[in-house]
């Protein structure tokens, strides 16, 4: 089926088109969610939200980009939204614990749960350290680094997903690598 015909079938609400959409994109969306939120249960929840968003807003899809690009854009946005909410909840819980004169909850970095099957490193400790370092990057660098290095997207694909030009993507990737290098150097210095 041609992409334009497929999109029209989705817009008409055809069940067979939605089934095909799930078959085609379910694993890719889930893998991208795992790249940003390396916890299987949370990634599954976000992936479900992504498909709900696709179903609810397919009529808004203007076909200026490929369907897959639009889906990756939704997926990335849903992951970032989840991470922002998670961070806000932690701040709120911490502040609440201070005002209630309770012992403050332990400072815990969310991106330390390592269930991501795509990252193969020598051991779990290195994976944990890498995701902690990635979580410290500025949002735009985190998106570019994750999509390129973990999800294997080309600079052109990332440009399409983020609506940024390729030179900006290259610059963000360069800065992400430099920042990760500094973060990891500082981590290993502190470990010694």
Image (cartoon, rainbow, N blue to C red):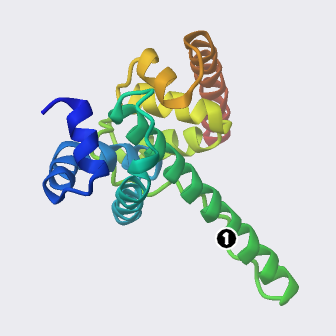
Q: Does residue 105 appear anywhere in the picture?
A: yes
Residue located at (60% from left, 64% from top)? 86
69 or 3, which lies in front? Answer: 3
Displayed quadrant of residue 191: top right
Displayed quadrant of residue 61: top left
- Residue identifier under label 1: 89
Above-or-below relation of 41 to 47: below
Is residue 187 left or right of 146 when viewed as pictured?
right
Residue located at (75% from left, 73% from top)? 92
Q: Quadrant of the C terminus?
A: top right
Displayed quadrant of residue 68: top left
Residue 97 spot, x, y in % from top left: 78, 82
Residue 59 spot, x, y in % from top left: 41, 49
Q: Residues within 10 Å of mark 1 (few under 14, many from 20)?
A: few
171 or 60, which lies in front? Answer: 60
Above-or-below relation of 174 to 108: above
Is residue 175 left or right of 69 when viewed as pictured?
right
Q: Does residue 27 appear anywhere in the picture?
A: no
Residue 33 spot, x, y in % from top left: 40, 49
């Amino acid at each position: 089926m041609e992409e334009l015909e497929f999109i029209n079938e989705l817009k008409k609400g055809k069940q067979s088109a939605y089934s095909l959409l799930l078959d085609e994109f379910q694993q890719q969306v889930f893998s991208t969610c795992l790249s940003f939120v390396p916890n299987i249960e949370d990634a599954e929840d976000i992936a479900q939200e992504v498909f709900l968003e696709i179903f609810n807003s397919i009529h808004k899809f203007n076909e200026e980009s490929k369907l897959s690009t639009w889906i990756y854009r939704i997926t990335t946005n849903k992951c970032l939204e989840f991470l922002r909410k998670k961070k806000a909840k932690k701040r709120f819980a911490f502040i609440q614990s201070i005002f209630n004169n309770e012992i403050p909850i332990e400072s815990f970095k969310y991106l330390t749960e390592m269930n991501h099957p795509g990252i193969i490193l020598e051991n779990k400790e290195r994976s944990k350290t890498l995701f902690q370092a990635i979580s410290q990057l500025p949002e735009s660098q985190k998106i570019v680094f994750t999509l390129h290095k973990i999800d294997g997207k080309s600079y052109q694909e990332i440009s399409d997903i983020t609506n940024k030009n390729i030179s900006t993507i290259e610059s963000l990737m360069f800065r992400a690598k430099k920042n990760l290098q500094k973060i990891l150097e500082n981590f290993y210095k502190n470990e010694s």
